[in-house]
Amino acid sequence: MKSKRLIILVISLLMLLFTLGCSKKSSEPDIHEEDPIVTEETQVIPSTTGDEIIEITDNTVVLPSDTNQSMIQEGNIIVSAPTDAAPDGLLRKVIGYEEQDGQIVVITEHARLEDVFERLELKISRDLKTSEIRSTEYHIDGIELNPDHKNPVVFSYDIDEIFHITEQVSMNIDGNLSLQMGYDADASILPWPFGISYVMAEGYVGHSSNLQISVNGGFSIYDRIPVVTHIFYPITLVIGGIPISFTPKVVIYLEIDAEGQASLTTSVSSSSNFLAGLEYNKPTWSAYNEKSVNFDYTPPDLSSALHARVGAGPQFELNFYGIAGPFVNCMGYMDIAANVDNDPWWVLLGGFNIDAGVKFEALGYVADYTLHDIIEHNSIIAEAEQRLV
């Protein structure tokens, strides 16, 4: 029976991570490296008081009864470096306070760096390191991080997992993945009425993998599955006496979109380097990217026809004081498209796409922004030999 279905399968954990600014672009505003200016309302919680914070919720901070009440007057902005009660630091605006049961309950709302600084230049540049992971959660059993303590910038994963998609179909992924990832940060706040005036968000990654994938059975499914989550230790910069704390977070996802009756086995090796970012130069957004990709493969062993696409990639966030800031979503994939009426009858494709954006809840009073498909790429890796006429 002739089939007009496309076969789309297989996976390589292509990735990209996100940042805020790497080097100055020609469009960046001319700030001249001026000293930061801190607003009069800003109060830094001393480390001794920060260590005594009793509890923090979304809209309260509970302090001991002997806390200096001049620090928590209505309208003040309270800031602290990471503490046991606030592991990602604290940035809140005081709405009011009341004494309860020998404690002071401060009513707060989330504040922004724009509330703290009348003028600021923030520049961050770091490689992610396995030695700086605070916690890891594995959402499936078949993936394991093998850190190289002599080379902590390399994230090396072993993957061996059978996904029982339905009672009739299973998918096995077996191989290894190696990543090197990093981010930069660049933001500028100018005196009133300008506020947050410049942000550059950029991420870079080097990647190599060697994965074998097989699938069989009859099925129809769409799912987006978290595979592993890394939360890194917070990093604190002190600028103008103000602790600015940010915490990277990475979640790797697997995405499956498939239906049909078939089986397929293939393996693919790939290596790549990506750099992508977006730039906000008030009020204009723009994007840029660089990329290089190489593939090798084992010709697929196909039976019957199916329609299946499997991809994977990270979701990366750079959170300020525990509040989401810049982010990137990257999905890498490999496709096999097969149709018995075509010549060649199967084509192996590799591709990836990247979305990025900034949530401004912890930065400034600007509307959140997402730019889709900063990189949208696919290319032919291999194809069946043409039939003889």
Image (cartoon, rainbow, N blue to C red):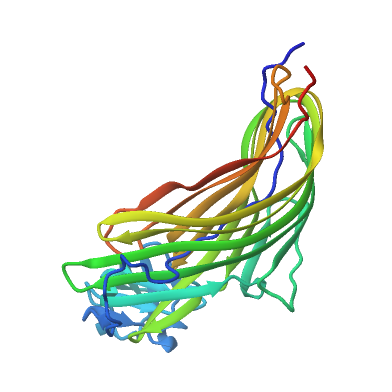
Q: Residue furthest top?
A: 1
- Quadrant occupied by the N terminus: top right
Name the one closer to the observer, 123 or 141. 123
Residue 205 image point, x, y percent: 59, 62
Task: Kindly indicate the quadrant of the structure image that contains residue 340.
Answer: top right
Name the one closer to the observer, 85 or 310. 310
Residue 363 appears in the picture as rendered:
no
Residue 86 position (above or below residue 366): below
Residue 83 image point, x, y percent: 49, 78
Residue 282 position (above or below residue 355): below
Residue 370 image point, x, y percent: 40, 50
Residue 184 appears in the picture as rendered:
yes
Residue depicted at x 43% and y 60% = 326
Task: Kindly indicate the quadrant of the structure image that contains residue 348.
Answer: top right
Residue depicted at x 55% and y 50% = 330
Residue 217 image point, x, y percent: 79, 27
Residue 214 position (above or below residue 6): below
Along the horizontal axis of the image, is 66 left or right of 168?
A: left
Name the one closer to the observer, 60 or 326. 326
Task: Kindly indicate the quadrant of the structure image that contains residue 152.
Answer: bottom right
